[in-house]
């Protein structure tokens, strides 16, 4: 084992660059034969440097200089270097500061490099060589214990590979070790090796000093409960940080700020606590440093999440996790939510479902038209039943969620045979406990809260809270036309929260229809499509009339898409053929109005969202996207569901991580074959969804191996004009 760490670097000056070869000796004596071999190898590969700098612990400086000057095994080395380079020996002391330097070979001046620069540049090189970053990919990113989302994080344990490398990082850490320290509190056990190297230095530089004791407080996992008592003779060492947030938490545990230090720091501003190594770029002192600022985000405003990446929770003190296991899943009838088929049986063809292109914090992708829902014949029948079974005859007030819910609320109460006072949500503040109707106190009488459509249910929770002040004794009956919930568990939690009361008369919650759909903030395939077309124009393309019209349509945010969600290869829109496995067989023929593209898209979205939110249990079929497991939608789904409108729904409803076939060998080859067959057959029925496949590729949602794209996007004389145009747009963007 060589006791050396070496680094070749250039040091810029005002007039020229100095080529320096740094050698750090992690031992008490210079091994002559190993030192010669190291220098010979460097000179053979990179020629003779301008100067050689040997860094040693101060007690070894004199003996090292003597060996370089006089050792017989170094005679040839002295002759080889003397005419061209100086060899300077620098000794460092207990504080990691320079104790002295001297030229051992050559007639030139001693090197002007500082120990601080040597430590910083060496640690940065070690960081880069050993992959100090754990980096995400297009499928996932990280949620740090601090709550920040990021596409990479630093892990010190990646650097702690060789003794000499650990020793030079320990030298850089020495200035941060107070003289009276007897204990080191560290954030991760990987720091034990570094503290051991610090003890090795201190044992030589301060003979007779007792080694530092070392315990781990397990980073964010244990910082709140760890015993920091005795910190007045201790130092807290944090392995790596970009924000200093963990140090601030430690300081909040009544640890003096002067006794908190970082080993590695990479941040946009000066750290609150001192650091042994600053990894950031500096033209003079650290030209190999990391120049690009790491992007971090706070929930819910995370650009990585908005792009379809899944946030992986980092836990523990070492974040030592393996990458995701890839597993394809093939959809079947049992994957649908239990009540999806009868729900679509009643609502398909009503025109109630749409996809919004609006943007902003309050935008919703899945839009349900309350008026069309209320007018659907089968919904009206169920509304009559719910009115008679859930609305008490003694109801004297009805709180209406919003303006869209007013027709629903009035119809509900009329069918129940009661004539209450209707109060809009904003009018709750005007109510009082003393209110009465026909001489009967309203506080204590049943009160109905009516909502045509809800998503998260937060508005109902707000109403529940407000009613506790003005109607604390009234039974609350919540009747909702349609609940869009992100999971069955979320829907159940909402109901349990709303019906909770200490009054003798229980609160109640009833939903006429329910769907499991992604939350509002999920990525929108239509926005990605618009970005694809806009990018093509920026690149200089002139869109054909159909694509220009499509671009204009996607800019319209005033009305949701219903039967224009997808783009067909020709003039005939994509329509559903009989035999959709997630619907009853007779549904398309029974409805007076034909099902829309949105009906199919909503169905597929329900199936996928149910799989995403399936409870974790052995053997469960589920779509998972986390550090341990990445489930893909098997490309064979595009073959089994061979209707173009279903294939388009799959491509639009899937998250990019679920159709990322760029890195999984088995699914990758199947995806290339199936997608290639769809695009190649664009002039045939099997290629109905060719345009949709090309939009998915061009927008970056569908990912295939780069090496196979040239085959899939080959020019084909049988392609319809729109397909041929999109092939060229995809080639321009992806190649």
Image: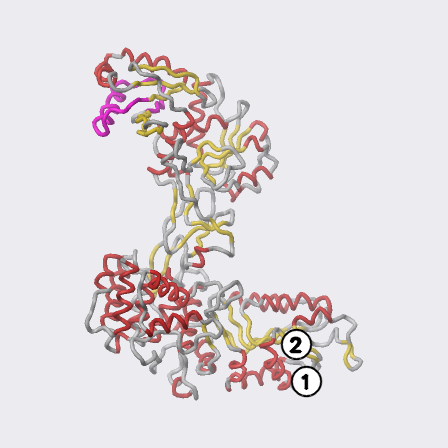
Question: In the image, is residue 421 above or below residue 194?
Answer: below
- The magenta stretch is 23-52
Can you give x and y, in whole percent of width and height, for residue 66 in the image?
A: 32, 12
Residue at the spot of label 1? 418
Can you give x and y, in whole percent of width and height, for residue 686 in the image?
A: 26, 75
Indicate which disc residue 712 carries.
none
Going by the image, does 468 lie left or right of 20?
right
Image point (58%, 69%), residue name: 495
Measure the alpha-carbon separation of dots 1 and 2: 11 Å
Query: Which residue is nearer to you in this view: 705 or 699?
Result: 699
Image quadrant containing the C terminus: bottom left
**Residue 481 in which image quadrant:** bottom right
Image point (73%, 69%), residue name: 470
**Residue 112 in which image quadrant:** top left
Q: As drawn, which residue projects farthest toward the right?
A: 439
Residue 384 is a magenta residue: no
Can you give x and y, in whole percent of width and height, for residue 604 in the image?
A: 40, 72
* Circles 1, 2 touching at the beta carbon (< 8 Å): no
Can you give x and y, in whole percent of width and height, for residue 30 in the image?
A: 31, 18
Local packing at callout 2 (Cα closer than 10 Å; few below 14, some 14-19, many 20+) is many
Residue at the spot of label 2? 448
Image point (38%, 39%), residue name: 158
Image quadrant containing the N terminus: top left
Disc 1 on helix, strand or loop?
loop
Q: As drawn, which residue projects farthest toward the left?
A: 717
Question: In the image, is residue 306 above or below residue 322?
Answer: below
Query: Which residue is nearer to you in this view: 255 or 555?
Result: 555
């Amino acid at each position: 084992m060589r006791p050396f760490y070496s680094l070749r670097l250039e040091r810029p000056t005002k007039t020229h660059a100095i080529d320096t070869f740094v050698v750090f000796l992690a031992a008490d004596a210079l091994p002559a034969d190993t030192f010669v071999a190291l220098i010979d190898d460097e000179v053979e590969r990179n020629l003779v440097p301008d100067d050689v700098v040997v860094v040693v612990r101060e007690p070894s400086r004199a003996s090292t200089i003597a060996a370089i000057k006089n050792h017989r095994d170094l005679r040839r080395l002295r002759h080889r270097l003397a005419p061209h380079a100086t060899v300077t020996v620098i000794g460092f002391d207990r504080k990691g500061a320079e104790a002295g330097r001297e030229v051992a070979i050559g007639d030139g001046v001693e090197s002007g490099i500082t120990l601080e620069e040597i430590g910083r540049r060496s640690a940065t090189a070690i960081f880069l060589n050993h992959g100090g970053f754990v980096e995400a990919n297009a499928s996932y990113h990280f949620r740090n214990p601090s709550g920040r989302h990021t596409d990479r994080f630093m892990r010190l344990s990646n650097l702690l590979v060789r003794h000499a490398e650990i020793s030079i990082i320990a030298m850089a850490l020495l200035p941060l070790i107070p003289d009276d320290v007897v204990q080191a509190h560290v954030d991760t056990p990987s720091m034990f090796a570094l503290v051991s190297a610090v003890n090795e230095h201190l044992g030589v530089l301060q003979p007779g000093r007792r080694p530092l004791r070392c315990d781990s407080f397990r980073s964010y996992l244990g910082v709140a409960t760890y015993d920091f008592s005795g910190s007045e003779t201790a130092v807290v060492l944090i392995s790596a940080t970009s924000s200093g947030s963990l140090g601030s938490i430690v300081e909040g545990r009544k640890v003096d700020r002067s006794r908190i230090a970082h080993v590695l720091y990479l941040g946009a501003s000066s750290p609150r606590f001192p650091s042994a190594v600053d990894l950031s770029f500096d033209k003079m002192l650290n030209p190999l440093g990391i120049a690009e600022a790491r992007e971090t985000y706070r929930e819910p405003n995370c650009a990585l999440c908005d792009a379809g990446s899944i946030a992986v929770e980092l836990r523990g003190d070492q974040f030592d996790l393996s990458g995701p296991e890839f597993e394809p899943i093939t959809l079947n009838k049992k994957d649908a939510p239990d009540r999806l088929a009868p729900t679509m049986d009643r609502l398909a063809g009503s025109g109630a479902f749409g996809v919004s292109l609006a943007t902003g914090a309050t935008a919703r992708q899945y839009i349900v038209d309350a008026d069309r829902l209320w007018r659907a014949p089968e919904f009206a029948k169920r509304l009559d039943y719910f009115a008679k079974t859930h609305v008490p005859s003694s109801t004297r007030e009805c709180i209406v969620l919003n303006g869209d819910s007013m027709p629903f609320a009035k119809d509900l109460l009329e069918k129940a045979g009661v004539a209450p006072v209707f109060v809009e949500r904003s009018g709750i503040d005007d109510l009082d406990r003393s209110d009465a109707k026909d001489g009967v106190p309203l506080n204590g009488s049943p009160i109905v809260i009516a909502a045509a459509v809800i998503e998260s249910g937060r508005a109902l929770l707000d109403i529940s809270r407000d009613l506790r002040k003005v109607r604390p004794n009234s039974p609350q009956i919540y009747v909702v036309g349609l609940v869009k919930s992100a999971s069955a568990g979320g829907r159940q939690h909402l109901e349990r929260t709303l019906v909770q009361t200490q009054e003798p008369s229980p609160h109640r919650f009833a939903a006429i229809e329910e769907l499991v759909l992604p939350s509002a903030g999920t990525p929108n395939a239509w926005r990605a499509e618009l970005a694809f077309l806009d990018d093509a124009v920026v690149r200089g393309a002139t869109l054909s009339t159909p694509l220009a019209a499509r671009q204009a349509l996607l800019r319209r945010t005033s009305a949701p898409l219903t039967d224009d969600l997808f783009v067909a290869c020709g003039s005939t829109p994509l329509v559903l053929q009989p035999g959709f496995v997630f619907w009853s067989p007779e549904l398309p023929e029974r409805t007076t109005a034909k099902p829309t593209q949105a009906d199919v898209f909503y169905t597929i979205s329900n199936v996928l969202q149910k799989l995403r939110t399936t409870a974790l249990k052995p053997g469960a079929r589920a779509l998972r996207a986390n550090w341990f497991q990445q489930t893909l939608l098997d490309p064979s789904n595009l073959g089994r569901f061979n209707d173009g409108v279903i294939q388009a729904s799959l491509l639009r409803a899937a998250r990019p991580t679920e159709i990322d076939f760029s890195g999984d060998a088995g699914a990758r080859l199947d995806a290339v074959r199936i997608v290639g067959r769809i695009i190649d057959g664009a002039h045939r029925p099997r290629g109905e969804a060719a345009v949709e496949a090309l939009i998915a590729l061009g927008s970056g949602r569908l990912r295939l191996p780069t090496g196979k794209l040239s085959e899939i996007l080959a020019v084909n004389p049988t392609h319809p004009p729109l397909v041929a145009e999109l092939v060229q747009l995809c080639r321009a963007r992806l190649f």
